[in-house]
Each structure stands twice: as structure tokens, then as C-alpha cells.
């Protein structure tokens, strides 16, 4: 029997959360990201704002992302689930109601895998990249608990050119601790592998992310970077509200979060 923890799966595939999920009965999460200039860590520069609406099961049902502080440019997404709680469909919009593309999720209990078709064309086939840059096929392999352990990303229906493979490792609490990515070019030649390592505090908040990029042939280190995350504010449910981001020792950005709880 294949068990999918759909909230975790939906949020993970959209890179929403790592480590512990926000606690208690949440209705809405409003996340605003800022960056700082190289020599100015006082003036916040707006990057984007995301508003996630959750249902009573804790699943994201709608997400709006704004790219200007005046909310004049945004995209949105709606999430659909089956009666077992599995994510089945995500529709992405540009300045709704104009449909941008759609992701359709198909589950295979026998192989513990999930296939995700993006931008299917009128012939019910994956559109060519030249026709639609969003066109791709994602195939996820899952462990017994429904966590993703491998992702394969294909572009172009003719020959299904493999673009990137990612592998995931978790600790005993189910937090992501390692991700390895191996990209390929259009001729199936491997690109530069990248390894990400993650560490957390006792409550599951992300503390450190170390990324290392390697040469595809001799595997020497090309570049490495470390991100440190600190938390300046929490609410009464111990969910963080302010996160500071340091890259290689320099404060480069911050995230502010407002959580609305369901009464």
C-alpha cells in the first residue's frame, strides 16, 4: 500500500518548508522575503510575498505569490486532493484567471512512484520545450512513508531528454539532511554535480545549508557556500516569525512570516 503524506509532498515539491512544519491549526501563512545590499544590512529590499491558504487537514489549497511590494504582479496556484488526501492537480495562473500551466499527479502503488506531467498539450502529450518552456515530466520515487527519495526531471517528449536527477536523504525525524543533484545536457552528458547538506535545531528549524559544486570529470570542488539561518522572533505556538539569512558569513536577507490561526 502506498502512503502519501500529501501536505508534506505538496509543500516539499514546491520547496516550501524544510524540517518541522508550522504547528497548530493554521488557516493562512503569509511569507515575505527581503534581501540586503552588499554593504547595507539595514535597508530591506522587497523580493516577494507568498500567501498560502490551508484547509483543516493542513494541506495547502491556494497559493499567491507577489513580486512587487504594490502587489501589482503576481502568480497563483490552486491545489486539489483526492479523498485519500493525495495531491492530484495543481493549476498555475498568471494574474488569475489566465491559466499558465497545469501539473497532473499520477500515483503508482506498485513502484512507489509519482509522475507529474506539466504543460500537457492538446494531444495529451508532453509539449516540446521549444513550444512551452514549462513543459516537463517529473518522476518521484518514494519511501514507505511517502517521502521523496529520488526525482527525475525530463524535458521534451521526443526521447524524453533527462535534464536533472536529485536524490534525497532524511534523518530519523524525517527532516531532509542531504540532497544530491546531477544535471545533464541535451546530449545526455553529465553536468556539474551539486551536494546540499542541511542541519536543524532540536525543534526542527533549519540552521545551516552547505552547498558544494563539483567538476563532472575529476570531482574536484569548483565552489562551496554556506548559509546560516537564525531566528529573531517566535509566536506563542513556537512557530518562527522572523528568519535571518547569512551567506558565507554576511547577512544577505531575511524572511518575515505572519501566521493566521483557525479559530
Image (cartoon, helix red, strand yellow):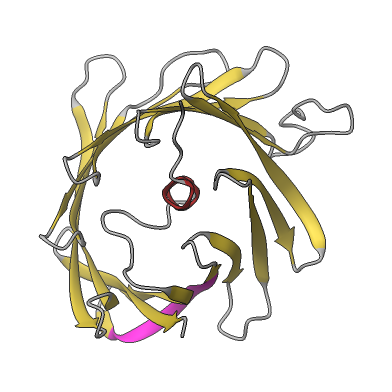
Image height check: is 8 above or below 51?
A: above
Pick whichever, 105 or 233, lies toward us.
105
- x, y (%) of residue 195? 26, 34
Q: Residue at x 55, y 83 (%)?
A: 69
Image height check: is 253 above or below 2?
A: below
Q: Is residue 52 visible?
A: yes
Image height check: is 20 above or below 186?
A: below
- Compared across the picture, whether 237 is left or right of 136 comes to left
Quadrant housing residue 130:
top right
Q: Number of marks in the image?
A: 0
- Compared across the picture, whether 11 is left or right of 241 comes to right
Quadrant housing residue 234:
bottom left
- Compared across the picture, whether 112 is left or right of 171 comes to right
Q: Is residue 27 magenta?
A: no
Q: Residue at x 35, y 35 (%)?
A: 145
Q: Residue furthest left?
A: 202
Residue span colored magenta: 42-52
Q: Residue at x 55, y 13 (%)?
A: 187
- x, y (%) of residue 113? 50, 25
- x, y (%) of residue 58? 46, 63
Main SS category, magenta section: strand
Image height check: is 169 above or below 6?
A: above
Amino acid at each position: 500500500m502506498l502512503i502519501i503524506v500529501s501536505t508534506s509532498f505538496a509543500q516539499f515539491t514546491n520547496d516550501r518548508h524544510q524540517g518541522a512544519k508550522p504547528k497548530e491549526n493554521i488557516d493562512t501563512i503569509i511569507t515575505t522575503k527581503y534581501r540586503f545590499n552588499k554593504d547595507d544590512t539595514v535597508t530591506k529590499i522587497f523580493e516577494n510575498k507568498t500567501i498560502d491558504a490551508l484547509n483543516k487537514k493542513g494541506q495547502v489549497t491556494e497559493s499567491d505569490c507577489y513580486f512587487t511590494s504594490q502587489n501589482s504582479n503576481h502568480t497563483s496556484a490552486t491545489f486539489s486532493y483526492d479523498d485519500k488526501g493525495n495531491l492530484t492537480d495543481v493549476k498555475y495562473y498568471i494574474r488569475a484567471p489566465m491559466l499558465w500551466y497545469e501539473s497532473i499527479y499520477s500515483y503508482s502503488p506498485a513502484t512507489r512512484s509519482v509522475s507529474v506531467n506539466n504543460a500537457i498539450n492538446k494531444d495529451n502529450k508532453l509539449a516540446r520545450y521549444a513550444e512551452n518552456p514549462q513543459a516537463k515530466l517529473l518522476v518521484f520515487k518514494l519511501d514507505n512513508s511517502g517521502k521523496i527519495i529520488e526525482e527525475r526531471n525530463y524535458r521534451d517528449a521526443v526521447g524524453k531528454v533527462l535534464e536533472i536527477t536529485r536524490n534525497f536523504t532524511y534523518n530519523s525525524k524525517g527532516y531532509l539532511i542531504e540532497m544530491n543533484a546531477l544535471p545533464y545536457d541535451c546530449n545526455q552528458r553529465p553536468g556539474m554535480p551539486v551536494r546540499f547538506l542541511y542541519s536543524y535545531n532540536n525543534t526542527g528549524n533549519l540552521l545551516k545549508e552547505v552547498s558544494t559544486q563539483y567538476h563532472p570529470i575529476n570531482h574536484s570542488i569548483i565552489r562551496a557556500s554556506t548559509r546560516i539561518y537564525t531566528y529573531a522572533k517566535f509566536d506563542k505556538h513556537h512557530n518562527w516569525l522572523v528568519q535571518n539569512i547569512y551567506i558565507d558569513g554576511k547577512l544577505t536577507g531575511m524572511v518575515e512570516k505572519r501566521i493566521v490561526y483557525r479559530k
